[in-house]
Image: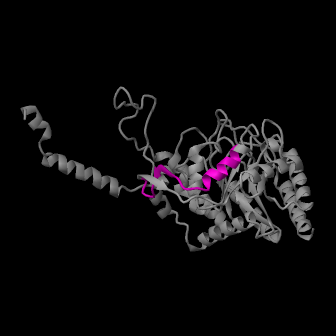
Amino acid sequence: MSPEDQIFRRAPSEFALRFAAEVTRQRTTRKYDFRGLEKGKGNMFIGMEGAKRDGVRDQRIGKVVELSPPERLLAELPLGEERAKVVIRGREEVRDVLQGKDPRLMVVVGPCSVHDPKAAMEYATRLSATARALRDDLLVVMRVYFEKPRTTTGWKGLINDPHLDESGDVNAGLRIARKLLLEVLDTGLPIGCEFLDPITPQYIADCVAWGAIGARTSESQTHRQLASGLSMPIGFKNRTDGNIQVAVDAVRAAAVSHAFAGIDDAGQPAILHTTGNPDCHIILRGGHGQPNFYPPEVEDALVTLGVAGQPERLVIDASHDNSGKDPQKQFFAAGDIADQVADGNKAIVGVMLESFLVEGRQNLVPGEELVYGQSITDACIDWEDTVSALERLASAVEARRGS
């Protein structure tokens, strides 16, 4: 063996061993100041900002910020026994509606995407009272969306940009989001979320009774695998061009087991092996500016499901291309869907509404004060129209029950 080989193959020095042990200790005992993170103090750089490891990797990464592990956040903001009962009951009720065991209609209703937790909680307080009044006919699930998929660019949602300033303080966003979910559960409402980032569910999924995969990601293998391991029923939207087959294929794919790379509760890289999710369904949201909630389109979707050997059930989103993102058209679309329910259509198991305290939407402009209770993403119907729409849907369920 050459002298050079002897140098490179010799045992690690005592200093090297102590150094490695100290690094391991720091990683396993590191504490996270979540309140500091929430104030934007979570910029814990791994390495130097703007530094390059070599001439090949990470050439377009400006900085790397440490992401707090799920177990830390769940320990600070625990679900608790009473809230867990709300989640479990909500999942069971959603599942029963999907399977036809519960004759009620599921209605997922709430802001397009939450940007103001205070306004969202005021909305939740109002909605919980309305949900209790209509519970004989409707299973009301509050829409609490934190991730906003974009066609090109724009605000990406509360988790990605909680301070509305493009700072990307994801640690703060996760904490604010989880805190809000726990507060909504305290009202007794089950929660619906869209899952976009495949890591996010480790931080919030224990609070969610129903989930959605959006129109831009229904065709994604990553999201189909993700849905196969989620603990709640999942709806797949038809593609933005109106293609329904993609959503049907997603339901089939999510029903079987998969293995994929992810993280565990400790934030460590892991291979996740799923068992498959049998509680998936499609969501009709229109496409290319054309609605698909009218009876002929609904029947075509049910035939597509039947040919694929899937349960003939669906949820209809009254917003997006089913109303051109126009609040007034959304209100009327909800009425048309209610008429189909009242006529006895039992395959329509749910409806989605984008609703907030104030009608319409507003632009997020730096330095300008936002209108309280109004969306900064898609336009929503206001609270008064929300109550009217829910009451009309409840009457339709009552008529269907008697038909």
Question: Where is residue 333 drawn, in percent x and y?
Answer: 87, 49
Residue depicted at x 65% and y 52%: 252
**Front-lying residue, 255 or 388:** 255
Q: Is residue 247 left or right of residue 176?
A: right
The residue closer to the viewer here, 267 or 260, is 260
Q: Is residue 252 magenta?
A: yes
Count of marks, rendered view: 0
Residue 33 highlighted magenta (yes or no) = no
| Front residue of this view, candidates 179 and 306 | 306
Q: Who is closer to the viewer here, 251 or 285?
A: 251
> If the image is split into quadrants, where does the N terminus sit?
top left
Which contiguous range is marked in magenta? Answer: 246-267
Placement of 220 over or under 385, stated as above or below? above
Q: Position of residue 118 (x, y in %)?
A: 67, 56
Q: What residue is at 61 percent from the left and 53 percent from the top?
A: 254
Q: Position of residue 204 (x, y in %)?
A: 56, 57
How was this image coloured? one colour
Residue 115 seen in the figure: no
Q: Residue furthest top?
A: 55
> Residue visible at 87% across and 45% down?
329
Image height of 254 relative to 394, above or below: above
Task: Tell me, yes or no, if residue 287 can be seen here.
Answer: yes
Q: Quadrant of the C terminus?
A: bottom right
Q: Quadrant of residue 394?
A: bottom right
Residue 186 drawn at (x, y percent): 65, 68
